[in-house]
Image (cartoon, grey):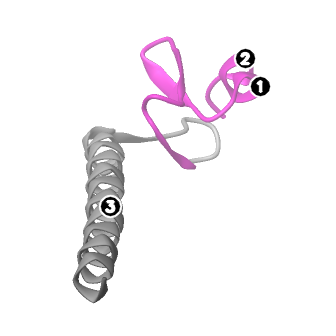
Amino acid sequence: MGRILFWVVLGFVAYIVWRWWGQQRLRDEQSAATGQKKIEDTMVPCDVCGLNVPQSEAFPGNGRWYCSDEHRRRGPA
């Protein structure tokens, strides 16, 4: 009876470790994917206030970049 209990407990621990390892690997892959996106995103300065914003979040206008739609409408200072 002791051997059976030992193998059941060992199997349960192995299952828990396997699940934890799979979730950890998935989290690492997700954080690496988001980290790559942030690294590849170029920072551009707002033409009105000079604030640096990621190009994906900036507002383009007349060949220049702006931090908000209000600054884009206002144009260069």
Looking at the picture, does residue 44 appear above or below residue 39?
Answer: above
In which quadrant will I find the C terminus? top right
Q: Horizontal placement of 3 versus 38: left or right?
A: left
- Identify the residue under disc 2: 73
**Residue 6: x, y in percent?**
27, 83
Q: Amino acid at mark 1?
A: Glu
**Residue 48: x, y in percent?**
63, 37
Q: Amino acid at mark 2?
A: Arg
- Identify the residue under disc 3: 24
Label 2–label 1 contact, CB within 8 A = yes
Numbered range of the magenta stretch: 51-77
Please tell me which residue lies in front, 76 or 73: 73
Q: Horizontal placement of 59 versus 32: left or right?
A: right
Q: CA distance from mark 3 to mark 1?
A: 43 Å
Residue shown at 25% from the left, 40% from the top: 40
Label 2–label 3 contact, CB within 8 A = no
